[in-house]
Amino acid sequence: MVHLSSIYRKLEEGTKRLTPQRELVIRIFAEHPGEHLSAEEVHQLVKRRFQDIGLATVYRSLELLTDLDILTRISFDDGRARYEFNQEETHHHHHLVCVECGHVDEYGEDLLDPLEARIFNERGFQVLDHELKFYGLCRNCVAKRKKNSGTPPK
Amino acid sequence: MVHLSSIYRKLEEGTKRLTPQRELVIRIFAEHPGEHLSAEEVHQLVKRRFQDIGLATVYRSLELLTDLDILTRISFDDGRARYEFNQEETHHHHHLVCVECGHVDEYGEDLLDPLEARIFNERGFQVLDHELKFYGLCRNCVAKRKKNSGTPPK
DNA sequence: TTACGTGCAAAGGTTTTGCACTAGC
DNA sequence: GCTAGTGCAAAACCTTTGCACGTAA
């Protein structure tokens, strides 16, 4: 759960104005938990649900919100950046990317803390954040493959 | 260590020709172990070390070599794709990305296998590959910060 | 010889930027 | 009223593609 009031406070602390456009971008993310939206997708959703705003404004809002640690930027190597609410206060989570259908799911557990301590000891590298993605087949696509396993591929 | 002969064999198996351009791209990676080169960087290096080849050819070579599992494509969210030799035969490694100076180092250990089994059991997601990046401060930048710790920031 | 590969330039897609106008605070 | 924010269009990037020409097998 994300608290909008804390977001507004962060904007004020950065002496950033709370404009209707920025509020709408934030609302889109609040209404789409667990999704990883691209700039274009945010733009379309804002237009459909509320009103037309400039795509450049969406980009600038996403950059601002990322700088304020309200959003996190992720890349799934599909040629465009994606964004989600920054969940550092609660916990890190990781991503399960299906190479068959493209679906991205989340995996809540964070088991990397001991590894981070070890990296600092061995290499002098002080970890601030990490990003872990698993590429593979989601439950549905595993099932589909099993179903078609009699059929020769291609 | 990468064996060039095995690369040439892979090209033949794919009925792909070993052209001078492709050979030069491969040599650039062989001469830059541990680096993560972008298409533009590969292009510049080939031009400087050997001869001028087309940038489009570099892109096509990188795509081909990635399809043949000779190279791996990685993204460090700097807006361009980067490539390195695929090290699946030896072992997975992860990346330590310094947020201060941008340097990318490698970390050899792969401790995720038990986690992958767990993900399949819990979620039905069959992991084929993974990608783990740690963002933080490299040894040098940690030292620099310590040295300047008397000075107030900015 | 002939299908595959290359180089060039043009096109495609995403993101950034310049500038005049608008609107929070 | 000032300054920051917006919208639009142009520009900047990275990457892909069409096509005529060249070349490895």
Image: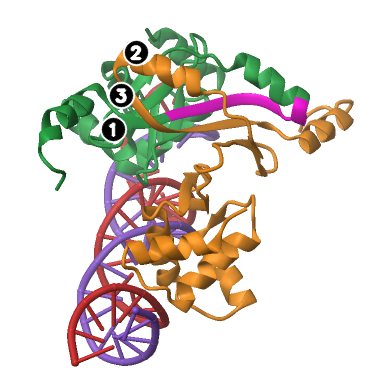
Chain colours: A orange, B green, C purple, D red
Task: Check the image and report above or below for A105 versus B106.
Answer: below
Image quadrant for the N terminus of chain B? top left
| Residue A38 vertical placement versus B21 (above, below) | below
Query: CB of mark 2 within 8 Å of CB of mark 1?
Result: no
Q: Position of residue A110 (x, y in %)?
A: 57, 29
- Secondary structure mainly formed by the magenta segment: strand
Amino acid type, label 2: Asn
Residue wearing tag 3: B35
Q: Residues within 10 Å of mark 1 (few under 14, many from 20)?
A: many
The chain holding disc 1 is B
Sequence-first tag of 1 and 3: 3
Q: Position of residue A93 (x, y in %)?
A: 58, 37
From mark 3 to mark 2, how far is it between C-alphas?
23 Å
Q: Which residues are magenta?
A: B122-133
Residue A80 visible, this orientation: no
Q: Position of residue C19 (x, y in %)?
A: 21, 82
Residue shown at 57% from the left, 23% from the top: A111
Element class at badge 3: loop
Q: Which residue in the structure is indicated by mark 2? A: A121
Tell me the SS state at disc 1: helix
